[in-house]
Amino acid sequence: MSQCLNPDCLHQNPPQTKFCQRCGSRLLLGDRYRAVGLLGQGGFGRTWKAIDLHRLDSPCVIKQFLPLQQGSGAVKKATQLFRQEAMRLRDLGKHPQIPDLLAFVGQEEKLYLVQEFIEGKTLRQEVEKGGRFSEDRVRKVLADLLPVLDFIHQHQVIHRDIKPDNIMRSPSGSLFLIDFGVSKQTSASILSQIGTVTGTPGYAPMEQVRGIVYPSSDLYSLGVTCIRLLTGCLPIEKNGSLADELFDHRRLRWVWREQLQNQSQTISAILDAALDKLLQDLPEARYQNASEVMADLERDGQTQKVGELKGSDKPAKEEKLLAVAKKLQSNLQEKEKAIAELKKTSKNTGDAASGFARLF
């Protein structure tokens, strides 16, 4: 099948067709990439699964820029963001957990990104199919993703849409951070700028809703992702409103601990404290970078290892104490022997002195 990318047509054509049989549009993007099926769509456009004819029909992803916002100003802003995504993906290089950018194509007055296709399932799919995650699995997610966030933040990039849907697990078990479509380029000196409101309700912090983002905004969203994985509670949109078991909208606070209690779940104090700090309302009260989170979690592991070493060292310490006790006992016996000899000598000396005295 060869999918027509014309948003007013979307006709499915026979595999080897070069032009759409319905509207006449070119079917090959850049004379190389052929769309074969729709993967998803959002406010910036559609995402298609495709094949690369120059690479033995290798799978790839075509992201078609098709903003839903109306008005020249909104379209101009969205176009700018879409172009920035291409530059960001190029600048992020070949990080093993970020899809490669293969091409940036303009065709028939439309813009497209072509990216590496990541085979696998999203964490949302894993939760929906297999249920909530254990603490060990959540810790593994943090261990895999925090270095990626540290990497992109050091490159002055804020993702702005961290959620289970945008974390993909490959068949080998590796986690990939996908969909940089709403990420924001930041300056090296000013890591917060006022801009377009983006992100997903139920994951984005309050400052992001107001159009301001920091690296800690991504960390907040990662914290929300973790509590949703732990509890299995995902936000559900009903009749235009968001139903969320993890957030008390009256008191404006997270109730993830209550959910864990209801599910008879417990987690370690160190993970509890880390999640609590990730989910602080005020950006300055959160972790300021991914390295701080990693340091806290690694410190917990080091503490456990130290405890293990102390336990394994116990026999050696007991043996050493026993040797010291034996030595003290030996010294005590020698002292008692010396005292006995001294008493004997004193007695003999006393007897001799007494006899000498009697002579006079």
Image: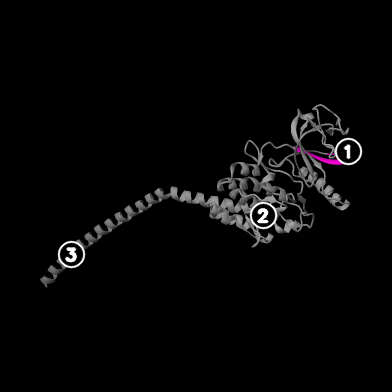
Label 2, label 3: how far apart the Cα atoms are? 88 Å
Q: Name the residue under label 3.
A: 347
The x and y percentages for residue 60 are 75, 35
Question: In what element is the residue under mark 1?
Answer: loop
The type of residue carrying mark 3 is Lys
Label 2, label 1: how far apart the Cα atoms are? 40 Å
Q: In front here: 183 or 247? A: 247
The x and y percentages for residue 205 are 70, 56
Quadrant (top left/top right/bottom left/bottom right) for the C terminus? bottom left
Quadrant (top left/top right/bottom left/bottom right) for the N terminus? top right
Q: Note whether 201 is above or below 169 in the view shown.
A: below
Question: In what element is the residue under mark 3?
Answer: helix
Chain-order first, disc 3 or disc 1: 1
Asked if the residue under mark 3 is in contact with the one under mark 2, i.e. CB atoms within 8 Å, the reply is no
Check residue 220 in the rendering and tell me which mark sits there, or answer none.
2
Question: In what element is the residue under mark 2?
Answer: helix
Q: Note whether 11 is above or below 162 in the view shown.
A: above
The type of residue carrying mark 1 is Glu
Q: Name the residue under label 1.
A: 108
